Image (cartoon, rainbow, N blue to C red):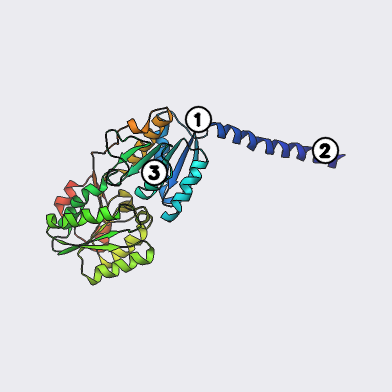
């Protein structure tokens, strides 16, 4: 009798367990879906995804309550992005949020001309052919344009101030990135402004990054500018190790690299830009047309210096540079 009751209990429990996910799935299916199309791996971008969630929350959308999320990550393999974008479309995403800049945004735009896309770019969306007008982008796309490429000259000037004796500066780019050619043109155009030779180096793998550093040392470049790229962001520790080994003054586009031990960064706040991306995604969910939402251009740029790293590798930071820094990591 006891065994019979036990079997009846387990049967009831199993039926309830099976029924709950079905109900949960039905409820989830009724919610609008925000599809995250990530060029990088998920781990390093957790806080940026959280910032998108915060932006969505600010306009009234909370995951599992009134909005569902679908995540697709390419793990730095940009050739996977078209298939991942197609999968999000098959899941009937109400809006697609590319994560990781140009590679994911270009893939999303190529995949759909109807599903709204809210991007966060470090490049000029007009230059990438995504829109024709920043104030009225038209079509199914809008977002945040941090214009990190537009300030490459400023970064090179900061490097020159940091290493005034250097006669050449290396610029490292990822050739797999959709904005690599634009980055290269910007860097070359800045060379006459700073009066220094610019050495363009390219890498799309860890081994190629190490090879690029070997070239940098052989060519006696006095400083390094790391281009804005999702794959490079994931390699923050490798950059810290290699720049420390060769005592190369280095500037990055994002503060996250300096938080990881990099020397210096100059650019917009990536966290705030992703928060604004979430706000725009929420506005689209509420019914606004992406083509009517002007592309947001941040106006504040932050200079961050890691003084602890500078001391460890024996690089002297000029007092005038420290005085202008928005944040100094001691």
> Quadrant of residue 244 in the image?
bottom left
**Earlier-in-chain disc, 3 versus 2:** 2
**Mark-to-mark CA distance, 3 and 1:** 26 Å
Which mark identifies residue 66?
A: 1
Q: Secondary structure at mark 3?
A: helix
Q: Is residue 227 left or right of residue 317?
A: right
**Mark-to-mark CA distance, 3 and 2:** 58 Å
Q: Secondary structure at mark 1?
A: loop
Extreme residue in the right direction: 1
For marks 2 and 1, give the one nearer the viewer: 1
Q: Secondary structure at mark 2?
A: helix
**Mark-to-mark CA distance, 2 and 1:** 40 Å
Which mark identifies residue 5?
A: 2
Which residue, given by chain and number where applicable, does mark 3 sit on? 109
Q: Is residue 266 shown above or below 288?
A: below
Residue 178 at x, y percent in the picture? 33, 52
Q: Is residue 212 left or right of residue 17?
A: left
Report the quarter where the N terminus lies: top right
Q: Residue at x 68, y 39 (%)?
A: 18
Q: Residue at x 29, y 70 (%)?
A: 214
Which mark identifies residue 132?
A: none
């Amino acid at each position: 009798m006891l065994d019979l009751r036990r079997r009846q209990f387990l049967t009831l429990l199993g039926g309830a367990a099976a029924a709950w996910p079905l109900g949960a799935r039905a409820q989830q299916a009724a919610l609008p879906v925000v599809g995250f199309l990530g060029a990088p791996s998920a781990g390093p971008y957790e806080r940026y995804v959280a910032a998108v969630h915060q932006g969505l929350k600010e306009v009234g959308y909370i995951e599992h309550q009134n909005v569902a999320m679908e995540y697709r990550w390419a793990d730095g393999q940009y050739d996977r992005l078209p298939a991942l974008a197609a999968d999000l479309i098959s899941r009937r995403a109400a809006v697609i949020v590319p994560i990781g800049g140009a590679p994911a945004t270009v893939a999303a735009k190529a995949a759909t001309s109807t599903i709204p896309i809210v991007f966060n770019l470090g490049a000029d969306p007009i230059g990438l052919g995504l829109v024709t007008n920043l104030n009225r982008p038209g079509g199914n796309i809008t977002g945040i344009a941090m214009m990190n490429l537009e300030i490459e000259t400023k970064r090179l000037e900061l490097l020159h101030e940091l290493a005034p004796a250097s006669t050449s500066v290396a610029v490292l780019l990822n050739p797999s990135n959709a904005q690599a050619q634009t980055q290269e043109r910007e860097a070359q155009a800045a060379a006459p402004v700073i009066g220094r030779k610019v050495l363009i180096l390219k890498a799309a793998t860890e081994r190629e990054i190490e090879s690029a550093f070997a070239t940098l040392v052989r060519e006696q470049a006095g400083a390094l500018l790391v281009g804005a790229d999702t794959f490079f962001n994931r390699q923050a520790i490798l950059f810290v190790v290699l720049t420390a080994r060769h005592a190369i003054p280095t500037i990055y586009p994002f503060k996250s690299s300096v938080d990881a031990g990099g020397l210096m960064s100059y650019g917009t706040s990536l966290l705030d830009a992703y928060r604004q991306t979430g706000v725009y995604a929420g506005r689209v969910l509420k019914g606004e047309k992406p083509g009517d939402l002007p592309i947001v251009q941040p106006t504040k740029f932050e200079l961050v210096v890691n003084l602890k790293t500078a001391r460890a590798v024996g690089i002297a930071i000029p007092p005038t540079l420290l005085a202008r820094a928005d944040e100094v990591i001691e």
